[in-house]
Amino acid sequence: MMYSLRVSGLAFAGILLAAFAVSMAFMPRSASAAAVALTNATTTSSNASTTLIKTGQTLSFQLNLDGAPAATSSPQINIFGMGSTTMTGTAGVSTSWVYSTTSASSWTEGNVTFYMAWGGTLGEATSTFSSIASTTLSNVRYDKTVPTLSAVTVVSNNASTTLAKVGDVITLTATSSEGVSVVTITLGGNAATFTNVTASTTWQGAYTVQSGDTNGAQAISVAFTDYAGNDGVTVTTPSSGSVVDTDTVGPVITVTGTNPLSVYASNSTTYSDAGATATDVQDVTASVSSSGSVNLLIATSYTISYSSTDTAGNSSSASRVVTVLIPGSGGAAAPSSGGGGGSYTPISAPTITPPASQQNNSSLIASLQAQLRALLAQIAALSGGSAGFSRDMQVGSTGDDVRLLQVYLNTHGYTVAASGTAGSSGNETTKFGAATRAALIKLQKAAGITPTAGYFGPKTRAYIAANP
């Protein structure tokens, strides 16, 4: 049997259409097609600030594409116009392409510029991306310059700006060649507080002097780093002026001569003080001022005060105690025992010299009073107590023995009257009054003498004889 194949016109037409479709699928696309598109391009560094980089750090790039480049045309990158380099990824598959390199000193400072180019798998036109033309890309800036300092000065808020005492503030001011992010300042080995003054190129470090800080020149140290991490050369000397000297202690005052000092009353009104000297850690010699006076006509204790302030403002003080004695009251040998017995050293009575003119009357009177008190004191000292008291006394009694009793009471801590008034030390009287009785009662109570009535009788005389 013989067969024949018949194809209708409609079926034939279908076969032709299918063949056309297959042939179109294997034809290359037009060069203007855009099958691979850029979605993002980024750049970053291994620096603490990822938009900055210094020499020897890693610079990284990433290219994100919507589609995959051809195996023969992987994305290329060109940095600073130094030649193209292939980025890393999986050809025909990856949408993320990366490249990294290490910055070198041969690079140009400033924003790191680069150029990227890629093509598609179907012969699309080459696409490019330029960091220079971008208005949205965050560039990495290369900084290889070491920062420097200028105008480094150190001053104190002391009246003398080159000296500082406890509580004064030492301030270091400097200007850097560029912005700095890390600054470490020490003054005399002590950490200073860092403060920006204007923008980021002028700044200060301040330190308040403390008790116990080392005296003398305060060495400085300024270590600094720019924002990219380049370390500047540590500065240890001011660019102008000098460092500040710390002085935390006041002058040492030395009182010249004897201290405390005892002198005898005399008719001279002039006391010549030996003075004092002062030394200081900063000043070779410091001036000393004194205040106070001594009246040689009045037997009592006086204080001469000395003060000194060094250049830094530290102050010190000292004093001398000068005691004016009645002749015989301090220099004569006291009786060895009460009752008037024992040996003693005779004391010559002072010579009374009349004035040359009537203009010296007040001085003469004062001198005579001092000499009279001296004589009374000698009598009391030589009498040994009981030898000077031969009778009982009470309120209303008068006489020189009353004065001697008042002298004894005043000199043994039983004050008869307030200083400068009748009955007080140096102003004893011949009248036994209520004040004398009150002082005598204090002595009797202290000595255990009964009755403590303020009556000066045999028991009290015996006590004074035993306790001259």
Image: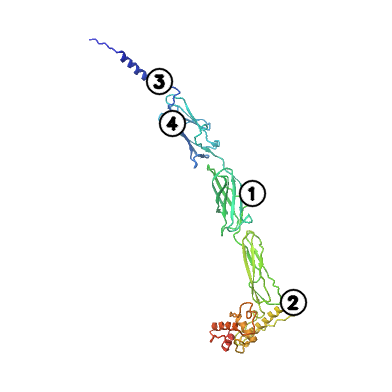
- Amino acid at pointer 4: Leu
Q: Mark 2 highlights which residue?
A: 360
Q: CA distance from mark 4 to mark 1?
A: 59 Å
- Amino acid at pointer 1: Ser
- Location of residue 93 with respect to 49 vertically, above or below: above
Q: CA distance from mark 3 to mark 1?
A: 80 Å
Seen from this angle, which residue lies furthest right?
A: 357
Q: Mark 4 highlights which residue?
A: 65
Proximity of marks 2 and 1: CB atoms separated by less than 8 Å: no
Q: Which residue is depicted at the point 43% across and 31% down? A: 65
Marking on residue 27: 3
Task: Identify the mark nearer the N-term, 2 or 4.
Answer: 4
Task: Identify the mark nearer the N-term, 2 or 1.
Answer: 1
- The image shows residue 271 at horizontal and vertical percentages of 69, 72
Q: CA distance from mark 2 to mark 1?
A: 67 Å
Q: Quadrant of the C terminus?
A: bottom right
Seen from this angle, which residue lies furthest top?
A: 2
Task: Identify the mark nearer the N-term, 2 or 3.
Answer: 3
